[in-house]
């Protein structure tokens, strides 16, 4: 053990050697991930056996610790950037952004205030302005902040909306969203002090869009009951189906009723880069606040969410604090301290990975990737409709499609079809061939594919469908 071990350092050559090994592991992962299984399965008992130990008091050789991590930790995680990772919302990522994160972490840059890192703050301003322009938000007044993800962005938006629309007393305030809205919105509403009775879950129509007439009726009833409608949360690409709520219609209701208009575009917002997506997202520029998630469909590694607002002063007026220990670093008003625009004081340098990847590949490359993702889902829909084995339950929408096994030559009831499709998913995952899980639409268990990985080919999709069909026929033969 070194005498100066308490300094927590390695010498220059040790750092270089160790760093090369880390980079080699990452490069090998990017190069070989397509050949690996996207699914990691392990029980708590197995993981305990592999990792449980008392806290080590004495040092272990760095290479030995790294070997343990590469051998036992990393392989026991799903590969969400794998071409056959279709479930939830995959994380395709990109190597440039990974290296940007490595730089930001290696230099340990504090991205909370201007005085700590003018360059980090400036790059957040620059990249935020790129996004404001992309989504048609006001150039001069608009603002925003990078967050850990969509959940934190939604929370930040709703805290801001509550302050502006409700003030200190929000006991009678009511908020509206569809039954397809992301669960992070309900969690955020609870976190900021609203009761369950103050949330209105509005049913969706046959296309899984919020039912406008039912929304208007709910607002009217609440006003007649002496309550205070204050916010509507619209979805711009739901997780279940990729559906976009009628944004223009909702914006008109918000304007007429003086409600805050928040759009959760954490999943689908990036579709604005494609012609079809931009058309479907018409009206997104009318939001008071908009959540997007670059670590989803803008191909960034975790963690990176984003909140955009029409007026940057809304964030500052909501979150600014003036503790005495920050009195010497406030700067002038043009030098933005992003800890004044959100919940976090200590913030990592998230803007760097977005900046470096956009600069390296160019926005056109991202647009082509998004356009490709939408098309491959549409191609899959056409393929499914030509099969006697499969039934499309929700058509391809912003690269999400839902379908189920429903053989044309069989006559199964709904319970049997639910069992069949659930078991197909279970067996595909157990085989580790693909990450393909179910969801529930219209009380039906369905298979769901989210196809936002630009490295997923139609061959990957066909191989997965063939596997699903093989398992389905086996289940049928077994007389489930």
Image: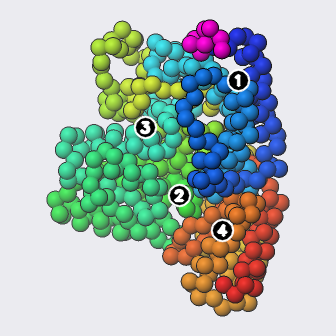
Magenta residues (range): 1-8
Question: Residue 92 appears at what percent x and percent y?
Answer: 69, 45
Dot label at residue 309: 3
As measured in the structure, the alpha-carbon distance from the residue carrying label 1 to the one carrying label 4 is 41 Å
Seen at 78% across and 45% down, the residue is 33
Q: Are marks 1 and 4 in contact (CB under 8 Å)?
A: no
Mark 3 vs 2: CB contact within 8 A: no
Q: Dot 2: few (<14), some (14–19), or many (≥20) neighbours within 10 Å? A: many
Instruction: Describe the element under mark 2 as helix, strand or loop.
Output: loop
Q: Which residue is mark 1?
A: 61
Which mark lies nearer to you, 4 or 2?
A: 4
Specify which label sits upstream in the sequence, 3 or 2.
2
First in sequence: mark 1 vs mark 4: 1
Q: Do residues under tags 3 and 1 come within 8 Å of each other at their CB atoms?
A: no
User: Mark 2 and 1 residues: CB-CB less than 8 Å, in contact?
Assistant: no
The residue mark sitting in front, 2 or 1, is: 1
Q: Is residue 3 on the magenta stretch?
A: yes
Disc 1 residue crowd, few under 14, some 14–19, many 20+, Cα 10 Å: few
Label 3 to label 1, Cα distance in Å? Answer: 49 Å
Query: Residue at image x 40%, y 32%?
Result: 342
* Left or right: residue 94 compared with residue 229: right
Of callouts 4 and 2, the N-terminal one: 2
In the image, is residue 28 above or below residue 212? above
**Can you give x and y, in whole percent of width and height, for residue 188 in the image?**
38, 48
C-alpha distance separating marks 3 and 2: 20 Å
Mark carried by residue 426? 4
* SS type, badge 1: loop
User: Which of the two discs, 2 and 1, labels the residue nearer the N terminus?
Assistant: 1
User: Are the residues flagged by discs 3 and 4 in contact, CB closer than 8 Å?
Assistant: no
- Eye-nearest disc, 1 or 4: 1
């Amino acid at each position: 053990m070194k005498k100066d071990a308490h300094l927590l350092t390695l010498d220059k050559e040790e750092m270089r050697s160790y760093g090369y090994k880390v980079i080699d592991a990452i490069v090998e992962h990017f190069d070989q991930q397509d050949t690996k299984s996207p699914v990691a399965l392990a029980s708590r008992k197995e993981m305990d056996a592999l990792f449980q130990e008392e806290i080590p008091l004495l040092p272990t050789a760095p290479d030995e610790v790294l070997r343990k991590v590469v051998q036992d930790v990393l392989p026991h995680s799903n590969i969400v950037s794998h071409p056959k990772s279709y479930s939830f919302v995959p994380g395709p990522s990109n190597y440039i952004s990974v290296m940007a994160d490595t730089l930001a972490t290696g230099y340990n840059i504090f991205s909370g205030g201007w005085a700590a890192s003018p360059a980090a703050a400036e790059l957040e301003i620059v990249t935020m302005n790129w996004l404001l322009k992309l989504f048609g938000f006001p150039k001069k007044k608009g603002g925003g902040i990078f967050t850990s993800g969509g959940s934190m962005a939604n929370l930040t938006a709703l805290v801001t909306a509550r302050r502006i629309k409700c003030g200190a007393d929000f006991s009678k305030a009511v908020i509206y969203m569809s039954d397809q809205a992301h669960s992070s919105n309900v969690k955020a509403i609870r976190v900021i002090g609203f009761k369950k009775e103050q949330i209105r879950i509005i049913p969706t129509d046959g296309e899984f869009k919020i039912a406008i007439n039912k929304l208007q009726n709910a607002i009217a009833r609440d006003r007649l009951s002496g309550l205070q409608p204050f916010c509507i949360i619209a979805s711009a690409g739901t997780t279940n189906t990729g559906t976009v709520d009628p944004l223009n219609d909702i914006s008109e209701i918000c304007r007429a009723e003086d409600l805050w208009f928040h759009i959760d575009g954490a999943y689908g917002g990036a579709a604005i880069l494609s012609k079809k997506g931009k058309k479907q997202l018409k009206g997104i520029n009318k939001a008071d606040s908009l959540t997007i998630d670059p670590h989803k469909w803008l191909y960034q590694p975790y963690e990176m969410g984003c909140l955009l607002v029409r007026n940057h002063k809304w964030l500052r007026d909501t979150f600014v604090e003036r503790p005495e220990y920050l009195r010497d670093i406030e700067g002038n008003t043009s030098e933005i301290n992003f800890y004044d625009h959100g919940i976090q004081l200590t913030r990592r340098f998230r803007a760097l990975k977005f900046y470096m990847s956009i600069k390296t590949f160019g926005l056109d490359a991202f647009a082509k990737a998004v356009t490709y993702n939408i098309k491959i889902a549409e191609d899959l829909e056409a393929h499914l409709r030509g099969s006697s084995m499969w039934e499309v339950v929700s058509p391809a929408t912003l690269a999400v499609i839902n379908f189920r096994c429903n053989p044309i030559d069989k006559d199964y009831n709904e319970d049997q079809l639910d069992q069949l499709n659930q078991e197909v998913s279970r067996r595909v995952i157990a085989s580790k061939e693909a990450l393909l899980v179910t969801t529930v639409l219209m009380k039906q268990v369905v298979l769901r594919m989210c196809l936002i990985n630009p490295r997923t080919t139609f061959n990957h999709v066909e191989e997965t469908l063939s596997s699903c069909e093989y398992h389905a026929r086996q289940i049928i033969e077994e007389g489930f």
